[in-house]
Image (cartoon, grey):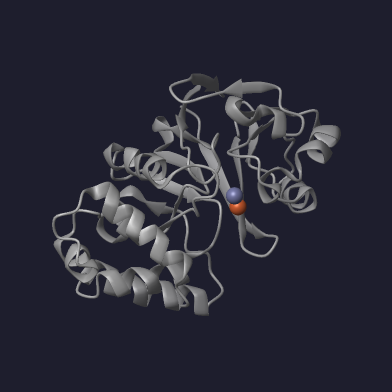
Amino acid sequence: MSHIDMRQFMCLSDNYGLIIHDSVTGATASIDAPDADAVEAQLKKFGRQLTHIFTTHHHADHVDGNLRLKELFGCKIIGPKAEADKIPGIDIQVSGGDKFIWSHREVMVYDCPGHTSGHIAFGIANEFSLFAGDTVFAMGCGRVIEGTLEQMYHSVNQFKTLSPSTYVYCGHEYTEANCSFALTLEPGNRHLQNRAVQVAAKRARGEMTCPTTIAEELQTNPYMRCNSPEIRSVLGMETATDVEVFAEIRTRKNNFKG
Ligand code: ZN
Ligand code: FE
């Protein structure tokens, strides 16, 4: 099977842009479209024509480039059915459990309500890739704005069963702050301590810290570790349910000053 090239870049203040490209078929998709100029510049740099946009949710920093890129390239926009009325230029509406073929590969759609009520993620199992939008971040998860904390718990934790080697592409570079917060909950987690050192070094060099992997998140992401005895003891929630622990962690994060 042909190779898919993944080009990730920073845009706006802390958004990730990502362009995936199949050199054999020429199929080229932008995962979200935070900024048309930034996406166009990347396409030009590598001589690519945009054929698709995969939209995860309706926030401006994920859809602002849709109409301009569609005008430039005539690309097809695939996005969440549940918030289709808020996705500029949407052509194809999808929701959790749907599968579609993109450049000979099966793309799986996951419902991820919480950050927004219709948020979706896209997975390409053949490429060990998950495009998580603002649902999962490195050592973090998105702010719960439209949905409930319980929905967000399920949205994040459904990915624990993906292959551990799956690369997780996130919507934002929030890694350092997430890591500082995670350390307050699990100061004794060696994986987290090691990751903090690696992340600080990468950021000091101005490098991106994503994609992450499911394996790394299972070891260090507090939102996937609600059953950790250390987290539960720090929170004084030894007998609570995982959903309750998740809700407490996500609520504390809103007030955390790293
Ligand atoms: Zn968002
Ligand atoms: Fe965002």
On the image, the x and y values in percent for residue 231 come to 22, 65
Quadrant location of the N terminus?
A: top left
Residue at figure coordinates x 52%, y 24% from the top left: 95
Residue at image point 53% right, 69% down: 207
In depth, the one of 216 and 49 nearer the eye is: 216
Q: Position of 72 compared to 235: left or right?
A: right
Does any portion of residue 57 appear in the rendered image?
yes
Give the total number of marks visible in the rendering: 0
Q: Residue at x 62, y 63 (%)?
A: 14
Task: Pick whichever, 41 or 86, lies toward us.
Answer: 86
Q: Does residue 128 appear to the left or right of 134 in the view shown?
A: left
As drawn, 80 above or below 158 = above
Q: Is residue 217 visible?
A: no
Counting from the top left corner in percent of width and height, residue 42 is at: 72, 51
* In this view, 63 is above or below 105: below
Where residue 6 sits: x, y (%)?
55, 45
Percent coordinates x, y for residue 136 in the rendering? 44, 50
Q: Quadrant of residue 90?
A: top right
At 21% from the left and 48% from the top, the residue drawn is 241
In the rendered view, does 222 fall on the left or right side of 21? Answer: left
Residue 38: quarter of image: bottom right
**Left-right relation of 184 to 110:** left
Between 141 and 238, the residue placed more toward the observer is 238
